[in-house]
Amino acid sequence: MDQDIISISGGHEINPPRRSTAAGAAIICADVALLCALMLLPGDTRQWTAAALALLAVCAVVLRSVRAVHLSLFCLLWAALPLVFPASRPWPFSLIIPVAVYGVTAAALPPLRRSFGWLRRGRPGYDILVPMTATVVLSGIALVIWYVAAKPDHDQFLRYMPRMPVWMFPLAGLGFAMGNAALEEAIFRGIVMDALDSALGPGPASILLQSVPFAILHLSGFPGGGWGMAMVLVYGLALGSIRRRSRGMLAPWLTHVAADGVIFAILVRVVLHG
């Protein structure tokens, strides 16, 4: 039986998960690789990726590797739900629905519920505030520089902004920043990083690997392209390090909210001034 089946976290800080067996760790690493492939390969290969993830999920259950079950379940939902419900493919449904279904399933099944240890506030402190502030400032500057230098196509982003009066922009921006940051943090600094900590130990390797699918997700996002993906990779490393240092999700979420706020502000400027 995988050691991590008995891992139960309490309090306000994330405790390092129990180490998975070698087989469980292999499944977790394969899940991350397939998650990256899912976002990089053409859409007509999704069914094969979903099939491979389903096989890994079955193996994780048979081996009773609970951390591998967590990650395999989420990755399978991300891959398979758009095949069953095509309406779930556009953003933000592509993120909201898999996270919601995963959360309900994990809450309903006792072994998954008992090992659900990453949703913790974490600790405050000056040593947390300094990297948070540095990341907020540097990421904001980097986003503006990327926007000016890359001159991205506005239409692909503005189609997600419904028409609204000017006075609603601050509320809409806050809602977007808080919601999008919560979804992405739950996926990458939550589900993915927790599983990688179990597979590889709570060291730099899991921080690096969780940032790779996070960067790939933004290949066609804001910032996008090769330079944008490289920027998000570094940003993911910073968020993972803040999560590790604070031992919670609040600090990386707040840091992420600030960056998404900058993105929304840039798009608002485009709407108002062209």
Image: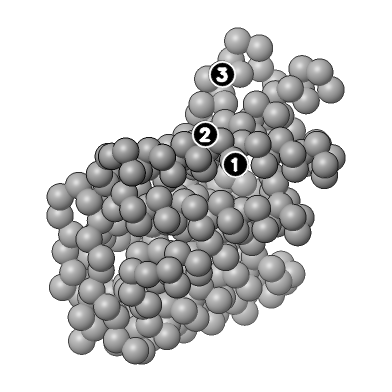
Q: Are marks 1 and 2 in contact (CB under 8 Å)?
A: yes
Residue 107 appears at what percent x and percent y? Answer: 26, 56
**Where's the N terminus, which quadrant?**
bottom left
Rendered image quadrant of residue 204: bottom left
The amino acid type found where label 1 is placed reads Ser
Mark-to-mark CA distance, 2 and 3: 13 Å
Task: For the residues labelled 3 and 1, say whether their Cβ atoms are less than 8 Å apart.
Answer: no
State the residue position of label 3. 170
Report how far apart the C-alphas of labels 3 and 1 lie in the structure.
Answer: 20 Å
Q: Is residue 11 left or right of residue 267?
A: left
Q: Label 2 amino acid? A: Ala
Q: Does the rendering let one see residue 50?
A: no
Three-letter code for the amino acid on which mark 3 is drawn: Pro
Q: Which residue is mark 2?
A: 258
Residue occupying image coordinates x 37% and y 77%: 200
Question: Can you see residue 194?
Answer: yes
Horizontal side of residue 245 vs 270, given as left or right = left
Q: Which residue is mark 1?
A: 139
Asked where in the image residue 190 lies, by quadrant, the reply is bottom left
Label 3 Cα crowd, 10 Å radius (few <14 / some 14-19 / many 20+): some
Q: Nearer the viewer, mark 2 or mark 3?
A: 2
* Dot 1: element: helix
**Residue found at x 46% / y 36%:** 133
Q: Nearer the viewer, mark 3 or mark 1?
A: 1
Which residue is more in the foreground, 225 or 24? Answer: 225
